Amino acid sequence: MTQLPETTDRKLGLVIDLDTCVGCHACVISCKEWNTGGYGAPLADTDAYGEDPSGTFLNRVHTFEVKPANKPAMVTHFPKSCLHCEDAPCVTVCPTGASFKRAEDGIVLVHEDHCIGCGLCSWACPYGAREMDAVEKVMKKCTLCVDRIYNENIPEEDRVPSCVRTCPAGARHFGDLGDAQSDVSKLVAERGGFDLMPEQGTKPVNKYLPPRPKQQQMADEPVNLAALAEPKATGFLGWLDGALERLG
Amino acid sequence: MHPAYSVIFFTVASGAGLGLIAFMGLGALRIDEMSTGFLLTAFGIGFALSVAGLLSSTFHLGHPERAWRAFSQWRSSWLSREGVLAVVALIVAAIFAGMWLFLDLSSAFFGVATAVLAMLTVWATGMIYAQIKAVDLWHRWLTPVCYLLFSIAGGVVLFLFVHALMTGKAGWELSSVAMIALLVAWAVKLFWWRGSENTPTSTPDTATGLGHLGKVRLLERPHTGSNYLLKEMGFQIGRKHAKKLRMISVMLGAILPILLILLAIPAPLDVLWLGLAVLAHLSGMLVERWLFFAEARHSVMAFY
């Protein structure tokens, strides 16, 4: 059913810390690894070793440069996947009912056996979170690892999305953003978590945490880096160094 | 946006075909001179164009064998509504045409119903694009208006051609209606095009949410190769040649058909001129529709 639920019991989603993310792409790879063998059709690569490699990914890491006026530029790594929006435009445009948002936890999913591969949902998503699989010809998207988070066959610590489990920097957090007392909600409140493209009116569940302000202000004068590379000797070697310098 | 040829052909062909069918529906109200040959030709062209268009629209699907499922979600999806409306419009039109042809009964009720349903179908086609907020150029109420006006213009030009073919004359009255329909449709389209100069709703600043910190620019793409998003949403050739292609579409779609219609009014060769007018108009529409997709910028490009 492509009508959106009025409310969902829970709002499961991710909180991504742009301050902590180091841009290692481990979440991209673990996502691909888990989801190519998990829910639905595998995530195909085409011409993987040829001239024009292309592939389906549910999570991608962009890298942006932010240049404040009169300050040095800073680099921000920016992982992007489905935001499991409350007003998901991708769901309502689906003509077949293949796309749906679950009333129990708010996860947006695709019933791949019902997908006709028209691509309209990928056009409707302002974030580019949906990709048509080039081999299976059905729409693929982040499932929030629905086959992990409720999976009682795997150890409890693994019952989080694959990207969250693998992140070596701890930049990704998973939880119920509908519950104000949950860890993720507290994190969002504390750090000023924000929505992507709020002007699109999609009400994303996933939140992003902004980079923290730089603690050390850069000196106005350019630092002489070459001087820092000069070896500094102490003790006997220091005396020898100075004596030899004086000899000319 | 990537211009899929099957979708371009579909919207142009079924737009004109449904326009002609709508005109035949309204024809039941006043034109009593239509011979069986006239009816067969007009309905034949109308149904052929609409059905060919609808069939071609399934060619761009990944799984055409599941296309029947697209009739189910009319409560929320304009694409589903379009499918349902197209089928209902064609069935009502077939009943209407059948009654007229075989029972010699030109039912005003079925005629008006045919016209209304055909136009609602075209409106739904326009709404498929107008509902997409992520594409600024499309997300305007003028988008379905353009689709509707082009369908009417295409329908009346086709009707004029069939009229000349079967009765041997074009006539001032009908020719004027056709020229006015063309002028109105293209005038609205010219106005629609001005939307391409609007500032984008979503920018790298809002896409990353980092705009308040400084000027945001992409440093590294997430991948070295291309991907589905760039192929589907990152189409840029259209914007490069947009100005020239707009000129070409206006020349072919509006100016040439109007000149040919003017030429056809006094001449004895009017069927030939009007045939050329139909071809010119449809070619202009193909260019216009290609541009409709190729020119449109999707908000996801703010991330690239």
Image (tube, rainbow, N blue to C red):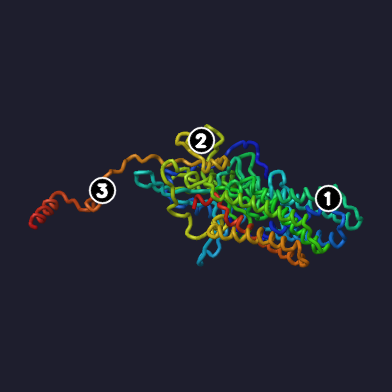
Disc 3 secondary structure class: loop
Q: Nearer the viewer, residue A32 or B131?
A: B131
Q: CA distance from mark 1 to mark 2?
A: 59 Å
Q: Is residue B267 left or right of residue A136?
A: right
Residue A150 % position (x, y): 59, 43
Could you say which disc has been placed on residue A223 in the image? Answer: 3
The one nearer the camera, B275 or A12, is B275
Q: Chain of mark 2?
A: A
Residue at 14% x, 53% y is A237
- Residue nearest the viewer, comparing B115 with A148: B115
Q: State whether discs 1 and 2 lie on one chain.
A: no
Q: Residue furthest right?
A: B103
Give, as a three-letter code, the residue at label 3. Answer: Val
Q: Which residue is mark 1?
A: B111
Q: Nearer the viewer, mark 3 or mark 1?
A: 1
Three-letter amino acid code at the position of disc 1: Gly
Q: Which mark is residue A185?
A: 2
Where the N terminus of chain A falls, by quadrant? top right
Gap between marks 2 and 3, in whole Å?
A: 42 Å
Q: Name the quadrant of the C terminus of chain A.
A: bottom left
Q: Nearer the viewer, mark 2 or mark 3?
A: 3
* Residue A98 is at least partly visible in this image: no
The chain to which mark 3 is attached is: A
For label 2, the crowd category at 10 Å Cα-Cα, with few meaning under 14, some 14 to 19 and many 20 or more, is some
Q: In the displayed orientation, state which residue is furthest to the front.
A: B266
Q: Return the x and y of residue B24 as percentages of the image width and height.
A: 81, 54
